[in-house]
Image (cartoon, rainbow, N blue to C red):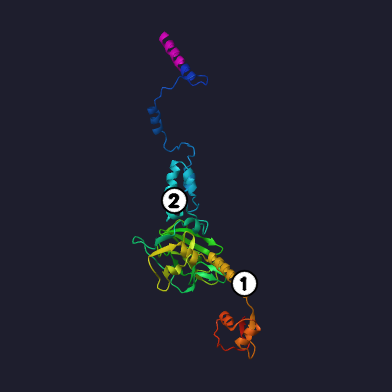
Amino acid sequence: MILIKNTCLALVMVTSLAVSAFSPNTTFVKSTISPEAISALKLNSNPDEKPLVKDDGKKKVAKRDDTTRVPINPAIIALSDESDETSEVDSLLAFPSNDLYSSWDTSTIHPYSFIESFKTDSALVHLTEPTDCGFVLPFKGNVTSEFGWRHRRPHYGTDIDLETGDTVVAAFDGMIRIAKLNRSYGNVVIIRHNNGLETVYAHLSKILVEAGQKIEAGQQIGLGGNTGHSFGAHLHFEIRYLGQAMDAQDFVDFEKGLLKKNDYIITKADVETKYDLRALHSRQKRDLGLSRVAYSKAKGKYKIYKVRKGDTLGRIAQRNHTTIKALCSKNGIKRNKALRAGQKLKV
């Protein structure tokens, strides 16, 4: 009996100690559980239960790196931390000719300034390389309008006749930078190429590619049409370098569908005297104005005499207090020049 009582008393004391160990008023001594034991507990936890972790920003970084939707500002790279810098640079280098442009804009049609970007007097451009797919004419058709001024407006492309629904293909290998509807160009595709050129395909009835997509020469990019500021179905085709439109017929023989040469030198002089249409127009207006002023000033130095029936150079000289020699010099005629009634002479 005494043994049974002692056993019961021991059980009560153990139970009491166990309950008190978990009471809110209990003070714990420093844990003696080792880090290895904690790791073992984590490994043995239920794999179906995903622990709650704080947002480490990876989703935001991935979203920012989606450069087919968002333009890249190179200034951001210098301010970002080390991990962001690596991902940003890798993303930038994925785009063709990044060493020239240093940006990738999928919203603005022509965001680049040739004057600010072209730092040298000339640049050599290899139109194709042995490792790429070469050149393919975007569409084989008659040229209906060339590069230059048209109806008092600059025309920066070459228009090729086609029917709505005809297949339009990429001229060179590259990556799609723009694939959208534009007010002037209509449905337009712009491709950046490894050689630094960008080609523009406008007035499409349908776009079959998207920004960020890699493309090969001859690959279909859309269907010909009559969208945007266009009168009749045609393909408006442009070749640009650092934003400056070039005359595509300097590069391409549209009748044969071939490149005229593979290596092309682009110079500042050519841009100033041939390709920059608005600047050329301004200079022509200024020069025309200067010539008119010069003519007006010169005109004030002499008067005009209308030849009468029976007039001779001697009689005209006598009437106007001058000499026959001076009359011949001013009018570029000889002394024996036959005069006719109504003829005008400078006197």
Residue at left offset 49%, top offset 62% = 244
| Residue 297 disc label | 1
Mark 2 and mark 1: span between their CA atoms? 60 Å
Magenta highlight range: 1-14
Q: Where is residue 61 in the image (x, y as percent from the top left)?
A: 47, 45
> On the picture, is 24 further left or further right than 311?
left
Name the quarter where the N terminus is drawn.
top left
Q: Where is residue 236 in the image (x, y as percent from the top left)?
A: 49, 68
Q: Please tell me in which quadrant of the rendered image residue 284 appears.
A: bottom right
Give the mark, 2 or 1, whose residue is nearer the N terminus: 2
Majority secondary structure of magenta residues: helix
Asked if the residue at tag 1 contacts the one at tag 2, i.e. Cβ–Cβ closer than 8 Å, the answer is no
Q: Verify whether residue 2 appears in magenta.
A: yes
**Farthest right residue in view:** 319
Q: Where is residue 120 in the image (x, y as percent from the top left)?
A: 44, 57
Residue 304 in sight here: yes
Residue at left offset 45%, top offset 12% = 9
Name the quarter where the C terminus is drawn.
bottom right
Q: Which of 201 and 114 is in front in this view?
A: 114
| Residue 92 disc label | 2
